Image (cartoon, rainbow, N blue to C red):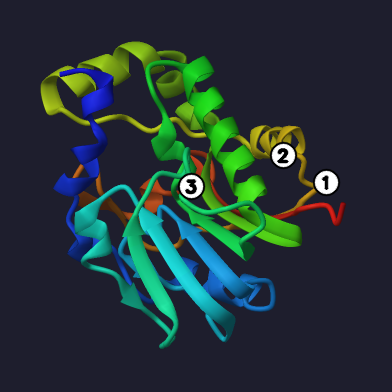
Amino acid sequence: MSVAQTPNTFENWNPDGFAQGAQYQRTIRTFTSGLISGDVLDVGCGSRIFYSLENTDTWTGIDISERMLSSIEFTDEIEDKKMLQGDVLDIPFEDGTFDTVTSCFLLHHLARTNKHISAERVQKAFHEIFRVLRPGGCLIVAENCRGHLEAPYHLFFTPIYYLALKFFKTEMPYFWKPKHFIAFGKEAGFCDNPLYVHVPIVESVYQPIAGFSTPAILNGDLIQKMTVFEFIKTEI
């Protein structure tokens, strides 16, 4: 099975496993409620839309997985919405189409083979998002940033990746530190020094690759720090 044949990894996920109304979701919703507005694009939207749509005019979700798109649940009602299959590495919209782009727990799943290739793919995603944002637009990124105890996993990422691909037909994620996301954003053209905040995980979290939830004690900051970033596209 080649790497190019693996987008269906996400078709094997169980949408019902993802929480709706978890504390971390409510926290992210509160922190971002005044930031998500206008014409919104959600890249890798998955099956749960938990951030506030109160100030949204239109909402568009793209995901590479049909199964995720067919299982979307919204916390808020919104009349003008549409979903379509699409790839964040080749967003099917013209330049300057959206006021806000959201990316919730997507970017670590762009990993392929090794750190270098994984970084190239995340960087390309940032460039595509920058392209479709209007000047002054906002990118909200929610990600699981890696903690100190995940260092061995990333040190041996390449053999782990290929073993998982061979025996479980799934791609393993590569988790980044806040400084990496800041560098990705800067290189793509976003304003320097984006705001970001860590959101503690105090409850069990569903792990779609494993197919089960891990208890809060295994989701602490030493392993991963759930983090929300706000990137602003320059007005020029």
Q: Residues within 10 Å of mark 1 (few under 14, many from 20)?
A: few
Residue with the mark numbered 2: 182
Q: Residue at x 62, y 64 (%)?
A: 98
Residue 217 x, y percent position in the rendering: 39, 51
Residue 52 in sight in this render = no
Count of marks overlaid on the render = 3
Per the image, the residue denoted by label 1 is: 193
The amino acid on which the numbered mark 3 sits, given as a three-letter code, is Ile
* Tag 2 near tag 1, CB within 8 Å: yes
User: Residue 161 at x, y = what percent?
Assistant: 31, 20
Q: Please tell me which residue is depicted at 15% across the width and 46% down the height of the picture.
A: 12
For mark 3, give the secondary structure. loop
Q: Around disc 3, counting alpha carbons within 10 Å, would you say few (fewer than 14), some (14 to 19), or many (20 or more)? A: some
- Numbered label attached to residue 91: 3
Viewer-nearest of discs 3 and 1: 3
Instruction: For the N terminus, give its image quadrant.
Output: top left
How far apart marks 2 and 1 lie (CA) works out to 7 Å
Q: Which circle, 3 or 2, is nearer the viewer?
A: 3
Judging depth in this view, the residue of 83 and 171 nearest the camera is 83
In whole angstroms, how far apart are the C-alphas of marks 3 and 2?
21 Å
Vertical order, 223 against 135 (above or below) = above
| 8 to the left or right of 78 | left
Tag of residue 171: none
Say left or right for 84 vs 177: left
What secondary structure is found at the residue carrying circle 1? Answer: loop
- Residue 169 lies in what quarter of the image? top left
When the figure is inspected, residue 118 is found, relative to residue 203, above or below; the finding is: above
The amino acid beneath tag 1 is Asn
236 left or right of 68? right
Name the spot of residue 144 as percent of width and height, x first.
Answer: 50, 46
